[in-house]
Every structure is written in structure tokens, then in C-alpha cells.
Image (cartoon, grey):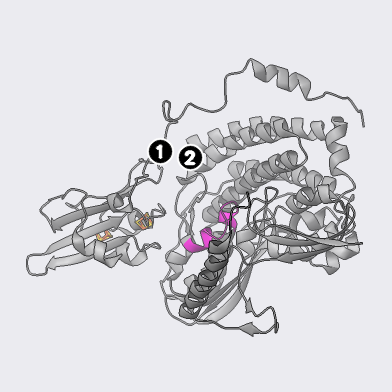
Amino acid sequence: MGKKLGFFIPELWRHIFKKPATVDYPFEKLKVPKGFRGLPVLNTELCIVCKACERDCPAEAIEIRTILEEEKKFQMTIHNDRCVHCGQCADVCPTNAMTLNNEFELSEPSRWNMKFRYAYTRQLRKKSDRNVDEKDKEIL
Amino acid sequence: MSITIPIGPQHPALKEPISLKMTFDGEIIKDADIRLGYNHRGLEKLFEGKSYVQNIYVTERICGICSHSHTTCFVNGVEKLLGIEIPKRASYIRMLIGELERVHSHLLWLGVAGHEAGFESFFMYTWRDREIVMDILEESSGNRVHYAINTIGGVRRDIDETQRTRILNSLKILKERTDYYKNLGTTEPSFVARLSGIGILPREQALSLCSVGPTLRASNIDMDVRKDDPYLAYDEVPFEVSTADTCDVLGRTVVRIKELFQSYNIIEYILRNLPAGDIKAKVPRKVPAGETVSRYEAPRGENIHYIKSNGTEKPERLKVRAPTLANYPATVAMLKNGFIADIPLIFAAIDPCICCAERMVEVKDTKTGRAEIKTFDELKKYSRDFYKNHKKIKKDTVWPF
Ligand code: SF4
Ligand code: SF4
């Protein structure tokens, strides 16, 4: 075994002149790769309310409520505070209504800002704003 | 005269909560007692309430480093219960992700070993190089940590041609870097001197204490589930089981570096011989009643999942034996007669993943030694009472100046 003290020194010396391996986040951001599993979003025009996503979500992050059965009015809440970004909802969706985008900066000061609500009639689209109603607050 | 010092559950040398009750005679460790239970998450109970599909993602969260090991172990077991054969291509992709995970885990460990041995620049370089494999994993699975590539009956994502060439190109850099670290070990005498001769685990003891993984192989025993009980398509892939005969922390480092090279070769073989075809077989949601044991060689050692199904969509029981748990008895033996200063290094050498190993919590009365079963409400009441009395003491405390 050839013992040589300071084997590591040339390596250290070389790195003085190299550019940093890290990036200056948040001023500079890394590119998100294709197929990244970010925030789940619903395309309300495509959803047929089969509830497969609700059934298979491991984190119980999807909640589908029937508002008016006769008028086919439904409301889906995606609890992004619970979501683990596994993408199972997008996998089981038969119509590709559910997809995961490439947003990764999802932190919020309050979990109530992380509930995404979609109220829709099966065909008509009406995306409400991101506020949460009183009933949800009661649940917690 | 011997004294007893508690190390942990919160200690700068330990990254996760665990309590080591050490008995010292001067600088020498005379006895060690490992206490678990500070990081219990109740996962096994959670499995029982979730369907098999949901459980893939729950098992993934047993560990943040060998996440793929746990899901593969689980889905392999479920597929055995279902009696189905998954497509060849799916097997190969599962192995590919598994080997990439081994590479990232071992590079991570090398960094930790450097850190514990006081070689900080080594730690930074290995972790920088680990980013290469993390990027590959993110690109091919969609996430850096929880790859979620497995599903019952196959895999969820395919490897395309651009990914294949990218991985092969990255492998070249990784090989070059690992080669440098290999030479570093043989030419940097201070690093070698720090690692050698500590945490001795003789061959017989390693066997009798049932240690697993690199800890076992560093005691010159060539046991590896991938060879002994091949799962997926490991019987088709040529590779060697890496061993070392020094039985100390240096040996465990050597085994891991050797395994890195083996993993690079396996990855290359998989990418060059990737069979064409489907990546997923159609499977029913209900699993027929029965029980099975599934074994998997995780980066830290043998991982075991026991699955019992009752014919419904949910498992009746899922028991997990993470490799770290199997290595604890050996750790106690390794610590004995060592020095205080070596504790972090010896402990880190088994690559402990403490929260993976936390499977059960037993509430014991310290006076009578009897175990008790408490309901959640009783526990809540107990903690409330405890803090009520505790506060009283705190309230009476006066500033002594
Ligand atoms: S990504 Fe996973 S956890 Fe999140 S909503 Fe979809 S299924 Fe649920
Ligand atoms: S699985 Fe798709 S179609 Fe079915 S309810 Fe969910 S989003 Fe709608």
C-alpha cells in the first residue's frame, strides 16, 4: 500500500477554482425534470366523478362531495396539506382529468391556504377561488 | 469504578432519536444498552386500514433512504399471494431503481463515515457526487426521494432511450469518482487509521447475532439475498457478493465501495439488456387469503415483509423487519471494549435507520417491570397528569442568583 500523505490536497486545490456545485436558491432555480410529481390539479371539464382517485389516494387528500345530485353538481377538495405527491390519483383517473403539474414551491404559512376547491357540474366548469368554507374549519 | 452515561435520545452524535445507555470504565465501554421507541409511528396499524394499492405508498414511507426497498419487498410479496408473474421489463426496471438506490445510499453512507471520522471534505465530495444519482432517479421516477415506481403487477413508468443514454453517461462519471475514493482509502493513511480496528465483529459473532447486510459481509460471510434467494431477475444478472475480512469499520467501508462497483455493473447490464414489452400486468384489487414472507436485499441488509391477507382489499397483517433492527444485537457486541470517541463511528457503520426499525412500543411500569396495554385515551390522561405534576416542580424553581 503506497502511503502518501496529502493525497487529497490536489483535489482540494482544484476545487478552489471550480464554480460552486450548489445553486443560489431562491434567486436561481433548478430545472424541474419532465414527469415531476408536483401539485395535483383537476381538469373539471373531464372529470366524470367516478371517485377512483378518492378511493385510492393513500393520504385521504381528495374529498368529493355531492352538492346537488339531480343537477350533477359536485365539489372536489384537494387537501394539498395532506397530499404526499405520489401520483396515484393521476394513475387511476380514467379520463386524465387529474394531473400533477411541476410546481414544487408549495409551502404556505397556514394549511388552510393549501386546500384547493373545485366546484363543478359534470360538464360546466366553475373553478372557485382557493378559500375554504366554515364547515371545513369545523372538521379540524 | 464504572459509570453509566446515557447517550441520546437527543444527542449531537445521533441523527435520529435513540437512547444508548453506556457503562464505562474510564474511556472503555463495558456495556451498552440500546433503547428504542422514541420514533414510533404506528405504521403497521396503519397498513391494516389501507388497501394494497394505498399501502405501496405507505410502505414507501417506512424509510426515506431505502424507500424503494420497502415497496419492492411489499409488492413482491403481494404478487406472490396473487400468484402472478410480472412482465420481464418491469422486473428489470425495478432492479434498476433498486440498484440506483443502493448507489445513492452507499454514497450517502460514505459521506457520513467521512463526517464521523472528521474528514469533512470527503463528506462534501461524496454528497456532491450523490446528486448525480439523485438527478437520475428524479428524472426517471418524478421524485428525488420517494420514487413510487412500483405498482402491484409491474412498474408505473418506463425508461426511454434518452434516459437510458443519460444514465449510462452519468455512470461513467460516478465510476470515475468512486475509483478516486477507492484510491483515497488506500493512500490517505489518517483516514484508514481512524477506521481500522474499531467496532470489531468476529465472523462467528456476526453469524450468531444474525447481523445482515454490509455489516455481515465485512465479517467475511458472503450472504446476500440477491444471490441466496434471488428475487425479480437477479438470477440472470452477473454480479459478485462483496466481502471483506477485517471485521471492523474499515471492512464495512470497503464492502460498500466494492458494492458500488458491483451496482454500477448491474445497472449497466440492465440498461444494455433491457427486454422489450409491457411494464404492467393487470391485477385484481382483492388478494386471495393466505400468508407470505418476502425478502429483499436493501442497501443496509436483508429486509423482510410478512403479509397476511384475508381475501379482501386490505391486508390483515403486514409485519416489517427492517435491516437496522437485525443489526442492533451486533452493534452492542461491537461497542463493547471500544472507546467513547468511537461510539458515533461504530454506530454509524451499521448505517442505522432508526425510525425504520421502530415497530412496537411497550409501555412498562419501571417499578414492577410489568407491561401494560393502554388505550389512547388513557395515554392522553397519563401525559396530562404527568405534566401537571411536572409543572409544579418547574414553577417552584427559583433563579439562584
Ligand atoms: S398525489 Fe397521491 S396523495 Fe396527492 S392527491 Fe393524488 S393520490 Fe392523493
Ligand atoms: S378519477 Fe378522474 S374522473 Fe374519476 S373522480 Fe377522480 S378526477 Fe374525476
B65 within the magenta span: yes
Q: From what the image shows, is residue B85 above or below residue B200?
A: below
Write down the region rendered in magenta.
B58-69
What residue type is disc 1 on?
Lys
Residue A73 in percent (x, y) is at: 12, 62
Please tell me which residue is depicted at 88% across the width and 64% down the height of the picture.
B205
Q: Which mark is residue B21?
A: none
In the foreground, A25 or B145: A25
Q: Mark 2, chain letter? A: B
Instruction: Tell me the quarter of the picture where residue A38 sits.
Output: top left
Residue that mark 2 sits on: B139
What residue type is disc 2 on?
Glu
Please tell me which residue is depicted at 85% across the width and 49% down the height of the picture.
B244
Badge 2, how many Cα within 10 Å: few under 14, some, many 20+?
many
Q: Any atom of ligand 1 within 8 Å of the CB at mark 2? A: no
In the foreground, B30 or B206: B30
Q: Which mark is residue A34?
A: 1
Q: Examine the rendering and report whether any part of residue B159 can be seen.
A: no
Residue B358 in percent (x, y) is at: 62, 66
Q: Any atom of ligand 1 within 8 Å of the CB at mark 1? A: no
Residue A74 in percent (x, y) is at: 16, 62
Q: Examine the rendering and report whether any part of residue B141 can be seen.
A: yes
Look at the numbered disc 1 and give the secondary structure of its residue. loop
Q: Between marks 2 and 1, how big is the CA–CA gap?
A: 7 Å
Badge 1, how many Cα within 10 Å: few under 14, some, many 20+?
few
Classify residue B251 as left or right of residue B369: right
